[in-house]
Image (cartoon, rainbow, N blue to C red):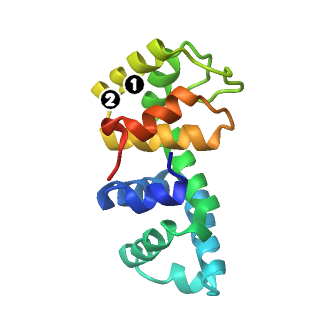
């Protein structure tokens, strides 16, 4: 299982750029908060980074999101992107496991899921969605929800389809 900053470090650069571009377009508050956090971590004024043209600014952000000191904001960025831009994937995963949700957002998760349902659901979402996006989602789901499903953690470490590198 990968942490959020590790996900940014291992994901294809085109996907990382897509996440940042879609966040810039669909969730400007989150984008600006990420920029402000980076500025603070690098001991810069946010206005300095905001004046850099978008492509250059995004390159700087992406270079830093793969570092441990950006873990919190990498997690927020991935979570926000998944909810805003990938609701179909979230819904397909939760529906496959018969977990009640509201447009991919869950109040309470079960303590465990059976192997059969999990395997079938993962096969289904891999068939319907980009493999890299599925891997990002499953790792984020595992690390951000506070519910440990040993069978999912095992699949994330042993199933070759669920590896980024």
Residue 122 has which mark?
A: 1
Image check: 3 left or right of 158? right
Count of numbered circles on the image: 2
Secondary structure beneath disc 2? helix
Question: Where does residue 52 sit, x and y in percent of width and height?
Answer: 45, 83
Residue 59's image quarter?
A: bottom left
Is residue 43 shown to the viewer in this render? yes
Above or below 65: residue 121: above
Residue 111 has which mark?
A: none
Above or below 127: residue 6: below
Image check: 86 left or right of 75? left
Question: Where does residue 11 sit, x and y in percent of width and height?
Answer: 37, 55
Specify few, some or many for label 1: CA neighbours under 10 Å numbering under 14, 14-19, or 20 or more. many
> Residue visible at 63% across and 73% down?
36
- For the residues labelled 1 and 2, say whether their Cβ atoms are less than 8 Å apart: yes
Question: Where does residue 124 sit, x and y in percent of width and height?
Answer: 34, 20
Along the viewing direction, whichever of 160 and 100 lies nearer the viewer? 160
Residue 129's image quarter?
A: top left
Residue 143's image quarter?
A: top right
Secondary structure beneath disc 1? helix
Residue 126 has which mark?
A: 2
Question: Where does residue 152 sit, x and y in percent of width and height?
Answer: 51, 30
- How far apart are the two marked residues, 1 and 2, measured between alpha carbons? 6 Å
Above or below 26: residue 9: below
> Residue visible at 67% across and 20% down?
110
């Amino acid at each position: 299982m990968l942490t959020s900053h590790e996900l940014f470090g291992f994901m294809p650069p085109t996907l990382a750029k897509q996440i940042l571009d879609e966040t810039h377009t669909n969730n400007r508050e989150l984008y600006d908060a990420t920029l402000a956090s980076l500025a603070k971590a690098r001991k810069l004024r946010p206005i300095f980074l905001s004046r850099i043209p978008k492509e250059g600014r995004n390159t700087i952000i992406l270079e830093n999101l793969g570092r441990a000191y950006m873990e919190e904001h990498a997690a927020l960025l991935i979570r926000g992107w998944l909810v805003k831009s990938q609701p179909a994937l979230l819904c397909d995963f939760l529906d496959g496991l018969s977990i009640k949700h509201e447009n991919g957002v869950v109040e309470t998760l079960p303590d465990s899921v059976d192997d059969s349902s999990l395997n079938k659901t993962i096969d289904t979402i891999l068939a319907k969605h980009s493999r890299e996006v599925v891997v990002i989602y499953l790792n984020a789901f595992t690390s951000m929800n506070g519910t440990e499903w040993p069978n999912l953690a095992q699949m994330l470490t042993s199933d070759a389809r669920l590896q980024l590198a």
